[in-house]
Image (spheres, coloured by chain):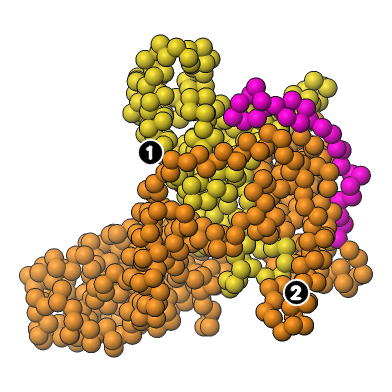
Chain colours: A orange, B yellow
Amino acid sequence: MSRRCLCCGPIAAQASRIDKYWLSSEKTPGVLAHNDRHTMVLCCNCLGQQNFECAMDFMDRVLDKVPACVIKEHPWVLALRPLYNNHTKGILPPSHDIEVQCCIACSLSITIPEGVRSSLLPIQAPLAIVGNNDTNISNVMMNDDVDDDDDDASYNPTINELNLESNSTNSEYDSYNTDDDDDADVDLPILLPLSKRKRAIYEGIGRMKNLPATEDDTMAFLTGYQHCATKPPNYKHLVQHTLQKAQRHKKAGRKIEYTAYSNVYEGAFYIPSHNLVIGNYTHNDRLFVDVHGLAPSAADGSPSVPHMVITKADADAVHDYHMKYNTKPKLIQKDMFDIFQLHDVPMPEDRSITRSWDVAHCTFPQTTRLDEVNKLNGSTHVEPEILANCLVYTWKNVHPDADVVLFDGGFGLEDYVTMKTVGPKLLAARMQSTLSKSISDSDVKTMHSNLSLLAGRKGFEVTRTSGTAGFTSPQSHADLLFVLHDNDSLLPNKAGVCTSSLCIKFLLIMSISHNNYLSLLCSRCLFDNSARKVLLPIL
Amino acid sequence: MTTYAPPKPGGAFLLNSNAIDAWQVLGEFAYIKMLITVILDKRNEVLQASGHLKVGHGPISHELRNIKYARKFFRLTKSLKVFVKAFMNVNSMSLVAYPVGQHNDHFNAGGESLENKITFIIKGVTGRGRGGSLFDNGYVFALLDWQHTTRTARKFYVTHAQEMGLGPIQSSGAQRILDTNIVDNQNQCKHHCNDHQLPGLNSLKKMSILYLWK
């Protein structure tokens, strides 16, 4: 039986290069299969094997390119470092195989406990855009809506199924000499047809990038802003009315949409340096828009203000806190606002047209120094005691008389910032309602499904390392494997063997091009639904 | 070596401004950002007149520059749709469908911008998304936008810089052209708006209409 190296063995062959690989392997069979006289590094976790020379080559490049602090605790590096030191001194490798707890291919997945699955869902085919003449999207959906199960089946085949398919249906590799005895145990890569789901997604992306324009001036209604007020709706009435209606429906045995209003903290915009929580009370029939100016400014020298969104878990915790101590959220009272009328404000499109706006304004003093707050960047958790002491602006205390509410924040605790030179920061400006009062649920759904295609890296944000995505965790590792599985282009096309190292806010994937052969993350992933597609080419 | 943050649903994208034909709310969303910008600018005037320091002077001035740029198209076409589309072309968007962790905002190359945000709710979908619905069900996602000169707009200016009388083509200086020359030429443009005597202005009008209405 041949011994296959993760780096240069046949299981590492890149799909697009397989033709060249097999041709060349006939000429140089030593590349194809390492015989018993080579020292191998054996992985106890995924049973992968790596030629000792390949391992030393990888180690050489990792130590050269990657900061020492990043890999100081990497298990594979720690295990092989003494051997590497000997190798650099010209000492021959041991004659027996070397066992390591995890190899370069599974160092990420070994950190994921059993049972932890990705929390992400694959991006779906887009819904039809209403009002757009292009109906291709709806055609795709209508044709494919029953294919989800089939799609998944072809997308996640078992190894046995793959082998069966390779023998029977895949004509792509008919020319390969699979009868060769030396290669009889080599699994051929399978090229599955592009799934319908993915084809619909690609078509949707192309469509969104080339949307046709209409002749109508669909934005003419915006002239209404020249005179209309944007005061907030009566949320208390809305909530009361909706919940009463839901109760009536419940009594009548009808399906109900709502049972209660949400926790005011959930999804709220939290500014820790000013102990301020600006609530988010989303409802498609009551839209509002926020504008923030929290980035550092070179113009006035003001620093950036850290901020975050409160999770449901934290919102529930602070709710429990209030229940336990019989307290209530500290709502910003109406008299804390300074309300005034701004006259002669020009309209954006034409300075000669002006109008007046009713503006409510409140400046919040700084409660915590920014350097102390910044230490917690990346955190998604806030202690309930802290949140319970924050001032809250939400639908319960929305200012009824203002078109726009402005929240400013001072920098009274900063040594280097003097109020004489640096003005307050615009924490938030809220346009309390919009001219188009509502948007239909179906429109929102359609918009989300189509915009998701364009967002990030095929629907997933993977490159924000400032702390927005939180800290790494076993869950995030599983999510990353899922995204790598779903996205063909996240790793370099010619990525060689990979290993990973953890930082607090992000993961470093170290990949090195290795003779145009590809070995990817984890062979264990074959069995736990992660990174399967990544591995398909190298099966 | 590649760096990946914990993956989350959503991400940044450049939106084709024709999307406002399908979803008018996106156009209104951009327009409200302009409205708030002019309101904040007016408030700063009032604050300055009363001896107070301005609030958010840096990002507001950057946004005003974009508004002035879009206003030029409105002056030529008298179309609010073209006006909004022109403004959207210098903005990038983000879809956020998760509660973001604590962070500081930074814009490319130390740029300054106001960040615009609107949230929507999808009913009947598993999960909470970003969170923050008025009632106890639904998946919430947010759309944000900030200043960003799109590749399309940049390409347009690079390609037509000479025709528009903006000086030599500078592939790397498109942002500067957009930020300075266009705005600086505004008075000139305003002065000659009716007689169409400037070849650059004619070209700008022609190109802008073709570009934005196509």
Residue A152, which numbered label? none
Q: Is residue A437 left or right of residue A108?
A: right
In this rendered view, identify the residue nearer to me: A90 or B176.
B176
Q: Is residue A27 above or below residue A178?
A: above
Give me the C-alpha separation between circle 1 and circle 2: 47 Å
Residue A137 quadrant: bottom left
Instruction: Name the residue nearer the viewer: A93 or A259.
Output: A259
Mark 1, residue position = B214
* A278 horizontally vs A91: left or right: right
Residue at the spot 43% in from the left edge and 40% down from the top edge: A215
Kindly tell me whether residue B119 is visible in this rendering.
yes
- Residue A331 within the segment the image draws in magenta: yes
| Range drawn in magenta | A329-356
As shown in the figure, which amino acid type bears the numbered disc 1? Lys
Q: Is residue A353 left or right of residue A85?
A: right
Name the secondary structure under disc 2.
helix
Instruction: Please give the name of the residue rendered at 78% of the width and 77% of the height, measured from the top-left corner.
Output: A248
The crowd level at tag 1 (other Cα within 10 Å; few <14, some 14-19, many 20+) is: few
Chain of the residue on which disc 2 is drawn:
A
Q: Quadrant of the C terminus of chain A?
A: bottom left
Residue A187 image offset from top left, x and y in percent: 22, 81
Q: Chain of mark 1?
A: B
Give x and y (percent) for residue A492.
Answer: 33, 58
Quadrant assignment for the N terminus of chain A: bottom left
* Place of residue A268 in the rendered image (x, y in percent of width and height, measured from the top left): 72, 57
The image quarter containing residue A225 is top right
Seen in the picture, residue A334 relative to A376 is either above or below; the reply is above
Magenta segment's dominant SS is: strand
Amino acid under label 2? Ala
Which residue occupies 50% across, 66% down? Answer: A73
